[in-house]
Image (cartoon, grey):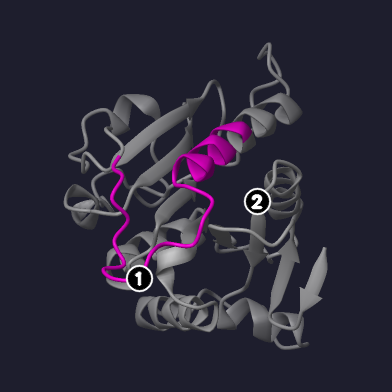
């Protein structure tokens, strides 16, 4: 793993690069982010991680505050994408908040793909407050990996949502928002994370491993949900 100032980088130099942001309460080097980044890198991906301003400020010794306002988070995502050469050769996404903010800028940035690990379809305990309006018309090829018992959007809830045909949802059986199974499950957390990483790696590979050609930034492939 290389530390490039604002970024943590894992894996070989290749295309497309995978850029991941963490969830609301975690840094870019949380155990979940470490496991996913290193797992994807071991499968041949180039993975770049970053933090939003509020978490970066805490890392520098400031107070640990709430997430920045949505316009700040969106703008920061777009700035990161620009610094990394533009969305054409990037699969963007992340855990929970990181993936949600990526989904809000993916089409605008012309991202090659979108990878959401535990998408927060609604706030905890507020299933009526859906965060899905923009997902109905999303054009970027997207993979959402979701735990079947995620309290921010489980299988019984998500099946009724109107989602773009560019989105594919894959399920981690008995997993919560971080894919952790119950103690009674026949699966372990390690097995659940391995499945999530395998799904993510296959998705990234499906988007191609060469720089996108000049011209329109939208990648041609779509995935049916």
Residue plotted at (27% across, 33% down):
224
Residue plotted at (54% across, 75% down):
66
Residue 42: percent from left, percent from top: 76, 44
Quadrant in the picture for residue 106: bottom left
Mark pair 1, 2: CA separation = 22 Å
Residue plotted at (36% across, 59% down):
103
10 Å neighbourhood of mark 1: few (<14), some, or many (≥20)? Answer: few
Above or below for 15 versus 225:
below
Secondary element under disc 1, as helix, strand or loop, is loop
Above or below for 141 versus 185:
below
Is residue 50 left or right of 34 when viewed as pictured? left
Residue 11: percent from left, percent from top: 74, 56
Magenta region: which residues?
A: 198-222
Q: Is residue 93 among what the camera can see?
A: yes
Q: Earlier in the sequence, mark 1 or mark 2?
A: 2
Q: Which mark is residue 214?
A: 1
Q: Residue 157 carries which label?
A: none
Residue 21: percent from left, percent from top: 57, 64
10 Å neighbourhood of mark 2: few (<14), some, or many (≥20)? Answer: many
Secondary element under disc 2, as helix, strand or loop, is loop
User: Which sits in the foreground, 11 or 65?
Assistant: 11
Q: Name the residue under label 2.
A: 45
User: Which sits in the foreground, 220 or 79?
Assistant: 220
Is residue 15 left or right of 194 when viewed as pictured? left
Q: Is residue 150 among what the camera can see?
A: no
Across the whole image, how many numbered discs are drawn on residues? Answer: 2
Above or below for 127 versus 47:
above
């Amino acid at each position: 793993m290389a530390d490039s100032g604002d970024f943590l980088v894992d894996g070989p130099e290749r295309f497309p690069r995978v850029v991941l942001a963490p969830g609301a309460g975690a840094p870019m080097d949380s155990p979940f982010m470490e496991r996913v980044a290193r797992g994807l890198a071991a499968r041949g991906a180039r993975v770049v991680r970053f933090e939003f301003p509020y978490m970066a400020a805490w890392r520098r010794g400031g107070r640990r505050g709430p997430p920045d306002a949505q316009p700040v988070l969106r703008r920061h995502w777009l700035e990161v994408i620009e610094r990394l050469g533009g969305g054409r050769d990037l699969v963007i996404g992340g855990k929970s908040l990181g993936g949600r903010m990526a989904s809000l800028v993916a089409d605008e940035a012309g991202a090659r793909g979108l990878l959401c690990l535990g998408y927060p379809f609604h706030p905890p305990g507020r299933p009526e407050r859906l965060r899905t309006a923009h997902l109905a018309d999303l054009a970027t090829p997207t993979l959402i990996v979701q735990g079947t018992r995620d309290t921010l959007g489980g299988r019984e809830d998500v099946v009724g949502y109107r989602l773009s045909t560019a989105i594919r949802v894959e399920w981690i059986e008995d997993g919560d928002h971080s894919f952790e199974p119950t103690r009674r499950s026949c699966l372990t957390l390690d097995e659940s994370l391995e499945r999530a990483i395998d799904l993510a790696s296959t998705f990234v590979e499906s988007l191609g491993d060469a720089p996108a050609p000049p011209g329109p930034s939208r990648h041609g492939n779509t995935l049916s949900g």
